[in-house]
Image: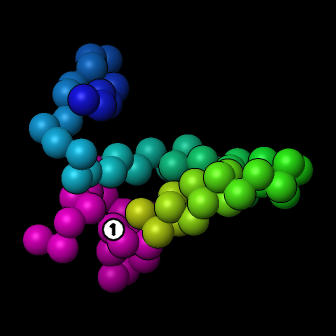
Amino acid sequence: MRYNSGYGTLQPFPDETYITIEPPGTPWVGRSFLRAYRATGDERLLEMAKQTGDALATVQLAVGGWRMRQPLSDE
């Protein structure tokens, strides 16, 4: 089970179908994976960078931003 710190407490996520966007942190995670891949050539880091970008693109709103917590499913 994953936890999210919100308002000074740890709140369990009900399942693994949500992403929490915390600018600038979340986009920088993907960038950090990409930079680490470039430095090491480790293909696993490139895959993690792609997965981070895909998750962000999946939940991006039509106006270009994100909600703080967004379901990853198409529902």
Q: Nearer the viewer, residue 50 or 25?
A: 50
Counting from the top left corner in percent of width and height, residue 44 is at 65, 52
Can the viewer see residue 7? no
Visible residue check, residue 50? yes
Q: Is residue 17 above or below residue 64?
A: above
Magenta stretch holds residue 63 = yes
Q: How is the image coloured?
A: rainbow
Q: Secondary structure at mark 1?
A: helix
Identify the residue position indicated by label 1 in the image: 59
Pointer 1 local density, CA inside 10 Å: few below 14, some 14–19, many at least 20: many
Q: Which residue appears farthest toward the right when viewing the image?
A: 39
Question: Is residue 12 found left or right of 31 in the rendered image?
Answer: left
Locate residue 22, reporting x and y percent: 44, 45
User: In what quadrant of the picture does the C terminus appear?
Assistant: bottom left
Image quarter hosting the N terminus: top left
The chief SS type of the magenta part is loop
Q: Check the image and name the residue furthest to the front.
A: 43
Residue 48 magenta-drawn? Answer: no
Residue with the most extreme bottom position: 62
Amino acid type, residue under disc 1 in the picture: Val
* Residue at horizontal 51 percent and vertical 49 percent from the top: 26
Q: Is residue 70 left or right of residue 66?
A: left
Residue interval drawn in magenta: 56-75
Q: Is residue 8 above or below residue 57?
A: above
Q: Residue at x 31, y 17 (%)?
A: 8
Percent coordinates x, y for residue 42 in the rendering: 76, 51
